Image (cartoon, rainbow, N blue to C red):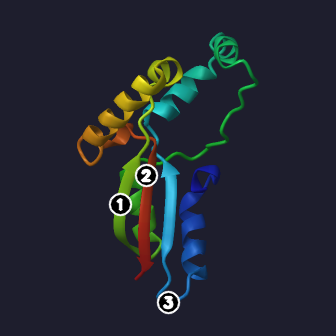
Amino acid sequence: MIEHFAQSARALAAMRRLIAPGGTLMLSTPQRYSLLETACRVAFLPGVIGLVRRIYGEAIFETGHINLLTARAAERQITAAGFRILERFSSGMYLPIVAEFGGERGLGFERWLERRVRGGRMDWLLWTQYYVAAPV
């Protein structure tokens, strides 16, 4: 939920104060430049939102993400707040046209692509980053 706070570093510092010794922080947050977040920004452009609403056949609302972080920024804020990162993971491949019109084949392709991207140089394309951290 830190993507909903303008000052995520302060929110993480507050979480650190709340976690008892021996406790664990489990955090997930969207990656700033992921394909899904980029598609959402494009979808809300004037002139595009009407088309998006027609495709989905329903109201489309903004996510409220006001503070999207890159993996580097998230890791820097987590450690600055007094945590040691124990595990990292990312997931969530989203290609809009494939996801909406590809059916099971499209889903299979996105899963295949996600496995190849995860952990490599293009990992930032995946939607969500996950962290498990312990107080220092």
For label 3, the crowd category at 10 Å Cα-Cα, with few meaning under 14, some 14 to 19 and many 20 or more, is few
Instruction: Name the residue located 64 percent from the left edge and 22 percent from the top edge.
Output: 44
Instruction: Name the residue located 49 percent from the left edge and 33 percent from the top edge.
Output: 36
Considering every residue shown, the one lying at the far right of the view is: 59
Q: Secondary structure at mark 2?
A: strand
The residue singled out by tag 2 in the image is: 129
Instruction: Name the residue located 76 percent from the left edge and 25 percent from the top edge.
Output: 59
Return the x and y of residue 102 as percentages of the image width and height: 46, 19
Distance, label 1 to label 3, CA atoms, is 21 Å
Is 31 placed above or below 93 here? below
Does the residue at mark 2 contact the one at mark 1 (Cβ under 8 Å)?
A: yes
Return the x and y of residue 116 as percentages of the image width and height: 25, 39
Considering every residue shown, the one lying at the far bottom of the view is: 21
Frontmost residue, 8 versus 64: 64
Instruction: Name the residue located 44 percent from the left edge and 41 percent from the top edge.
Output: 92
**Looking at the rendered structure, which numbered label has been put on residue 21?**
3
The residue singled out by tag 1 in the image is: 88
Is 21 placed above or below 34 here? below
Q: Amino acid at mark 1?
A: Arg
Number of the front mark, 1 or 3? 1
Return the x and y of residue 71 as percentages of the image width and height: 38, 51
Image quarter where the C terminus lies is bottom left
How many discs mark residues in the rendered view?
Answer: 3
For label 2, the crowd category at 10 Å Cα-Cα, with few meaning under 14, some 14 to 19 and many 20 or more, is many
Considering every residue shown, the one lying at the far front of the view is: 104
Return the x and y of residue 57 as percentages of the image width and height: 72, 18
Q: Secondary structure at mark 3?
A: loop
